[in-house]
Image: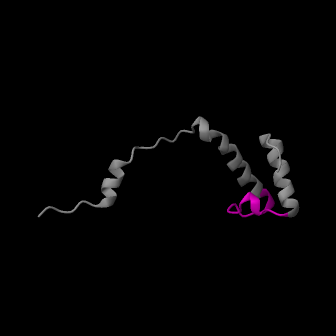
């Protein structure tokens, strides 16, 4: 009797290999993610926090930093 094929084995064969390159479409976001991680470390904010969850002075500081470093207007 033939041994059944595992789903995981077939799945890895079906998916194309991904490259580790930053495309023009996604490259613009990398700086913002790095800036967010640095901001969190310097301000004692858990990195899992979403920018929209910030309040008060910390939120103002993030918006100012984002505008200064990324050239995007603060909301």
Q: Nearer the viewer, residue 74 or 10?
A: 74
Which residue is depicted at the point 73% across and 52% down? 36
Q: Is 16 on the left-hand or right-hand side of 22?
A: left
Give the main secondary structure, helix, strand or loop, of the magenta stretch: loop
Which residue is depicted at the point 38% across and 48% down? 15
Residue farthest to the front?
Answer: 75
Quadrant in the picture for residue 22 = top right
x then y, percent, for residue 26: 61, 41
Quadrant in the picture for residue 29 = top right
Instruction: Name the image colouring.
Output: one colour
Residue farthest to the right?
Answer: 57
Residue 32 against residue 55 in the figure, above or below:
above
x then y, percent, for residue 43: 80, 60
Quarter holding the N terminus is bottom left
Q: Is residue 37 magenta?
A: no
Q: Is residue 45 magenta?
A: yes
Q: Which region of the structure is painted magenta?
A: 42-55
x then y, percent, for residue 24: 60, 35
Residue 14 against residue 58 in the figure, above or below:
above
Q: How many marks?
A: 0
Which residue is depicted at the point 85% across and 49% down? 64
Residue 70 against residue 45 in the figure, above or below:
above
Which residue is depicted at the point 66% across and 40% down? 28
Q: Is 27 on the left-hand or right-hand side of 73?
A: left
Residue 33 against residue 54 in the figure, above or below:
above
Residue farthest to the left?
Answer: 1
Residue farthest to the top?
Answer: 24
Q: Is 5 on the left-hand or right-hand side of 14?
A: left
x then y, percent, for residue 14: 34, 48
């Amino acid at each position: 009797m033939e041994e059944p094929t595992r789903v995981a084995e077939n799945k890895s064969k079906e998916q194309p290999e991904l490259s580790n390159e930053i495309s023009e479409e996604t490259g613009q976001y990398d700086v913002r993610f790095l800036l967010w991680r640095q901001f969190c470390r310097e301000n004692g904010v858990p990195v899992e926090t979403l920018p929209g969850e910030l309040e008060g002075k910390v939120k103002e500081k993030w918006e100012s930093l984002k505008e200064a470093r990324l050239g995007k207007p603060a909301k």
